[in-house]
Amino acid sequence: MDMVDYLENMGITVCQRAFFSYMSKPQGSYGLHMIFRLFLKKKRIVMLERDRANWCRFLSDYVVFRLYIARFVLKDFARDYPPLLSMYDGFEKVEKDFPDFLTKEADPGRGVGDISLLPDNLPYLYSEEKIKACHEFFDHMAAKAERKLDDSDAVLKSLITEGLSYLCDKDKVPLYTPVFWFFSKETLSYAQYLSELYKGLIPESHYENLQARPYKEVEREEDTFYTDYRLPAYILFFLAGLICLVLAKA
């Protein structure tokens, strides 16, 4: 495998990592959908059955938004180190077959997501053309933020705020303040993870002229739900319940 193939495969890996949580410790070890369910339970927020279809669309649309964030963060690092452009080929491979990718990565057997939270009619909702249209829409948001703001951290936060607000309105979900906080901080943490990963792919000999910088650590009030013993315990109970449910249906 040469460097081009390696970086293309890294692009696919980055897409797969969009399904993990980066607020929980250790980062990237737990499925995002699972952590979100536990977060709702902790905050005593009920996902009403009448809203379920809308939430399913929102969660899948949010993954699309994360893949856009991966592209957006890569842009500055690829400008400094052009070989990283090969990672975009990996992104495009995923986006061409996004419905199958979404189903595979959300398989609960992988410990990543929850296939029950996927919307119906995935091929229609996430055709290659619709994915590109979403990215173009987010491009307009990013360009507007970059015209108004000089600081890269501020641009990213503006993009995330506007992007989440757009998805909330599009999918008609009640994005309560704690839920908006959850997704905004998760996205910022994912962007920080990406920027550190991209920098790690650049040879140290190029660091002296590197303009792109990893995003600053996300500032947030400490929530012990993500750091103490309760998180692994909740996850074990959740998985045990899921296994019991599967066995009961067998």
Image (cartoon, rainbow, N blue to C red):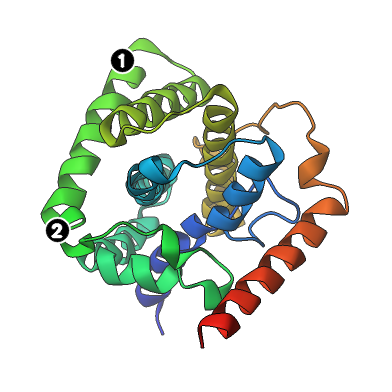
Can residue 213 be seen by looking at this rendering? no
Q: Residue furthest bottom?
A: 250
**Which residue position holds label 1?**
147
Name the spot of residue 219 as percent of width and height, x first.
69, 26
- For badge 2, the amino acid type reads Tyr
Q: Nearer the viewer, mark 1 or mark 2?
A: 2
Q: What's the residue at 23%, 69% (across, down)?
A: 97
Q: Earlier in the sequence, mark 1 or mark 2?
A: 2
Residue 16 on image: x %, y %: 46, 65
Residue under the point 41% across and 48% down:
59
Disc assigned to residue 124: 2
Displayed quadrant of residue 133: top left
Distance from disc 1 to disc 2, alpha carbons, whole Å, reads 34 Å
The quadrant of the picture occupied by the N terminus is: bottom left
Q: Image check: 140 left or right of 248?
A: left
141 vs 123, nearest the viewer: 123
The image position of residue 168, as x and y in percent, is 36, 30
State the residue lying farthest toward the right: 229
Give the residue type that dot 1 points to: Arg
Looking at the image, residue 8 sits to the left or right of residue 125; the answer is right
Q: Is residue 143 above or below residue 87?
A: above
Q: Secondary structure at mark 2?
A: helix
Q: Residue at 75% of width from left, 67% of height from top?
A: 236
Q: Residues within 10 Å of mark 2 (few under 14, many from 20)?
A: few
Secondary structure under the numbered disc 1 in the rendered image: helix
- Residue occupying the point 68% across, 64% down: 238
